[in-house]
Amino acid sequence: MNHRGATIDESARKIPVVHEADVVVVGAGPGGFAAALQAARMGARVVLVEEFDMPGGVHTSGLQGAAGPGVGGIHTELMERFAAGGHIYTVTESSLPGWAGNPLSHYERYLKPDATFTRQSFNPDGAGNVMSRMLHEAGVVALYGTAFVDAVVEPGVGNDSIKAIIVEGASGRQAIAGKIFIEGSGTGQLAAAAGVPYVPGGGGQPAGAAWDGVKRPIPGGLLWMMSGVDFAALRRHQKTTGDATLSKTIAEAVAARDIPAHLYRPRMNGRNVYGDLYIGHPTIDMSPMLADGTFILWQNAPYEWALRMDESADDEARARRELRALIEAEASFLRKYVPGFETSTLANVGRYVGVRDGRHPLGEHVFCLDDVLARRRFADAVTRPMTKSFFWDENRKHEFEVPFRCFLPRKINNLILTGASLSFTYETIFMVMRNFPWCTQTGEIAGFAAATCLRKGITPKELEWREPYF
Ligand SMILES: Cc1cc2nc3c(=O)[nH]c(=O)nc-3n(C[C@H](O)[C@H](O)[C@H](O)COP(=O)(O)OP(=O)(O)OC[C@H]3O[C@@H](n4cnc5c(N)ncnc54)[C@H](O)[C@@H]3O)c2cc1C
């Protein structure tokens, strides 16, 4: 039955205001978490809403778990506290021989065989527990199992202001009022609900760059784990068959119709906006995680499905359903065909399909590739110059700065952006400025800005940012 086009009237109702906070944060990923923590540590009354059961976003609920080096501030503190809690797992070339240069390795495949490396990951649930405790210690009122559903906006002269957010949880529909709001949903949900203009996922791609002219978002992904893998046996199989990518084994399973068509998809010969990246996995894609014999695996949505999971419930449902089916098929294939996996077991699946290219809210400044190439300097830079290589010029490192105006969305006076929802063009945020350490830094900056504004009695747009925070 198709009810498209039909509507019903929702009756007006009074919603209880259950909290009146200084700072209200939507989403507890790296951005929202660090913003809430920093603002609370500076004395603000902070309420944070998170739909899952722990902070950390893609990195905990989404199982990502890659432990990056510290950059100072809350990110470094996190890594230290994960380590102190016994949640960091480390492998090197001597503990996992045959991993460097292995084509099955997500991160180390480009190393020379036997090269030295250190790969650290954290236990997502252990890390989530630590982050939850840190928020509690700082006095943040963290409402888990609570979904943000709407924003109540007061019109102003020029810009508007958010008065409250509407949330839904075990107590039903409730309102949380606040003075300053922080966008930490990873997909610009609060900004969009408040009326901030944004570029949708895939919408910023240069015309003609997509392989058939259709602008598709960079696919999201669902991460999952297998335990009980005998990597030494897998390595022996790779060596003795001379089939390091396992493409012969995959071909055998395809011939036997044991692999669905979308599981190991062919590379696109550069027809994707990101060359061959993110169209799926021609082979197995994994990384050591948690403990010996456990690996995290990537299951990205096929690029050609063009899913917009942040804006379409149908797309999100399809991603969850079909990626789980692909995971099930991959686990069965590995157990049946690949030595080393015979007695392995499906250990965990991320709580959600992470969105890589969702809404890009437009801020007072939109950070773009030209800012990097022109080595543009900003009086309101939030960090000292950073050095990174960008996708279209991978062989060169560029020094660049990010202005505070990227944290300030157009149209709304009392909202601060963080993490994957900063005002960046898709080509600067994807692959470069979406990483865990940077997203945590942006949250810390946002929390600092919010608490400073409260002390001064001004809005974030009135805050004169004079010196780098990091
Ligand atoms: C599949 C995938 C793999 C990645 N791999 C890496 C990697 O290897 N290394 C790396 O550094 N980065 C990686 N990234 C990028 C990085 O994870 C993200 O850019 C980063 O997590 C963004 O941080 P955030 O705080 O903005 O949002 P998120 O981490 O997405 O967190 C958003 C939080 O908001 C909550 N939320 C969302 N909507 C609502 C709502 N309506 N109500 C209440 N709560 C809500 C979510 O539950 C979540 O906890 C990856 C991303 C994806 C999707």
Image (cartoon, rainbow, N blue to C red):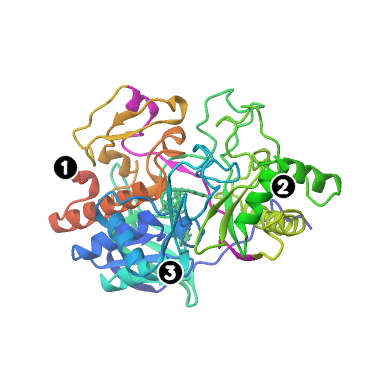
Q: Is residue 209 above or below residue 68?
A: above
Whole-number angstrom distance, CA of label 1 to CA of label 2: 51 Å
Say which mark, if any, is on residue 126: 3
* Disc 3 packing (10 Å; few <14; some 14–19; many ≥20): some
Which residue is the site of mark 2? Answer: 263
| Residue displayed at 53% across by 49% down | 355
Percent x, y of residue 428 = 41, 34
Residue 455, by quadrant, is bottom left
**SS of the residue at dot 3?**
helix
- Judged by its main secondary structure, the magenta piece is loop
Q: Is residue 61 above or below residue 270?
A: below
Q: Position of residue 153 (x, y in %)?
A: 37, 55
The residue indicated by pointer 1 is: 464
Report the magenta residues as a range. 346-373
**Quarter of the figure that contains the C terminus:** top left
Q: Is residue 314 visible?
A: no
Residue at point 56%, 24% (across, down): 207
Image position, residue 143 (x, y; %): 40, 71
Q: Answer whether labels 1 and 2 touch (C-beta < 8 Å).
A: no
Answer with left or right where residue 57 lies relative to residue 457: right
Left or right for 91, reference 130: right
Q: Amino acid at mark 1?
A: Glu
Q: Secondary structure at mark 2?
A: loop
